[in-house]
Amino acid sequence: MWQDIEVHVRSCDQCQRRSTRKIEVPLTPSIPSTIFTKIHVDLMDMPESRGYKSIITARDELTQAAEGRALKNKKAKTVARFFWTQIICRYGAIAQVVTDNGHFIIREAILKSCEGDPKRWPDKVHHAFFADKCLARRATGFSPFYLLHGVDPVLPFDLAEATFLVEGFRQEMPTAQLLALRIRQLEKRPEDIQKAAMSITKSRFQAKWRWEKHFARRFLPEGTIQPGTLVLVRNTRIEKHLNKKQYPRYSGPYEVYRQTKQGSYVLKELDGTIDRRAKAAFRIMPYIQRRPRLPGQKKHREAQPDIDFSDWELDEISDDEDDLDIIHQAEMEAKSINKTKKQSRVGHGRRHRKHSDSTDTSEGEESL
């Protein structure tokens, strides 16, 4: 009976449309291959200064090296010029470009270096990106500058102190010995790049495991959503609205037509019209459908297996009229049991009072 009640409650149409439940999709970590094969690009708005309004950045996935420039506009021609001069002419053609808005730290560093005068930020752009290249990364253990060039950066104070950050260098050393030390540095670079790639891959898989452990209850079991399954689509457009409570959080139901190679879903209306725009997997939630009893269908109950509703293993759920009969019968039995208990308590109280009265009477006679 409790299972039937749970099915009835979970299959409420309005409750599903206004549900705050969110579905999460397991992460797929990308494994870096070579330098500047995949880059992450972002356009950041900045306070207008001397005609400059924004910063464009491009960060390599493997070395974490970033290139950036201040822009006066966001036109396609301006962005294309940045790609040609800063990326392609330096590192060659790029196989994959991702726009993920992931350079918040660079923007904050530039504004903080202005020391209270935000209008100075165009003068700090190149300083910020060079400092970012010289900073060692926790994931790789190396600085982006070292992974790009095979040597550590030589800063102005290194020239003054003649340290060069490498053992063996000294002033007025022979050219052959200097070349030998440089060759020794460059020979280690391929090994260090491979080590950095393995370190990045390991850290990403560790982050994936931690994330999946944290959101384990939000995952759908593999194979839950198949072609033909009824689903709801999360209305992400209203999530940032202040009055979002009055709008349904999910729309639908729709029928799943197919799943793309990237993991998104192509849906279709219940009349068969296919939506050409695929929906991301995290927006899809299975729709729990009620199946009414058909006219003339006999009232009978089939043995139902135990269902773990938290795993969303609900394809089609029946809601027969005999469910209501069972609930009504259970309520009548509960009322009958409560009435019997109440009568027994009343009878016990009367017998106790009668026994107390008789005891008081006997004690009074003895005192006389």
Image (cartoon, rainbow, N blue to C red):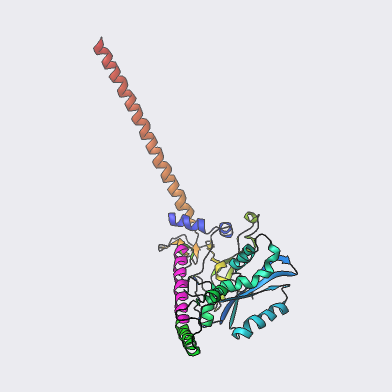
Residue 322 visible within the image = no
Count every numbered label the image shows and give the total: 0
Q: Give the residue drawn at x 44%, y 49%.
A: 329
Residue furthest front in the image: 172
In the image, residue 101 lies at what x, y percent? 61, 69
Residue 182 against residue 304 in the figure, above or below: below
Residue at 31%, 22% in the rendered image: 356
Residue 290: % across, % down: 53, 61
As rendered, which of 62 and 90 lies closer to the eye?
90
Magenta span: chief secondary structure:
helix
Task: Answer left or right for 64 relative to 342.
Answer: right
Q: For the N terminus, which image quadrant?
A: bottom left
At a point 46% along the width and 51% down the height, the residue shown is: 327
- Identify which residue, 217 or 323, lies in the foreground: 217
**Residue 31 counted in the magenta span:** no
Horizontal and vertical percent for residue 169?
48, 81
Whether residue 340 is visible to the viewer of this picture, yes or no, is yes
Where 226 sits versus 293, above or below?
below
Instruction: Please state if 308 lies on the left or on the right of 123 as rendered.
Output: left
Magenta stretch holds residue 194: yes
Q: Which residue lies furthest to the top in this view?
A: 368
Give the farthest residue toward the bottom.
176
Q: Which of 177 and 273 is in front in this view?
A: 177
- The spot of residue 6 in percent (x, y) is 47, 56
Magenta region, residue range: 192-215
Which quadrant of the view contains residue 80?
bottom right
Q: Pick the quarter of the image with the C terminus.
A: top left
Q: Which residue lies furthest to the right in this view?
A: 51
Question: Camera-side residue: 365 or 138?
Answer: 138
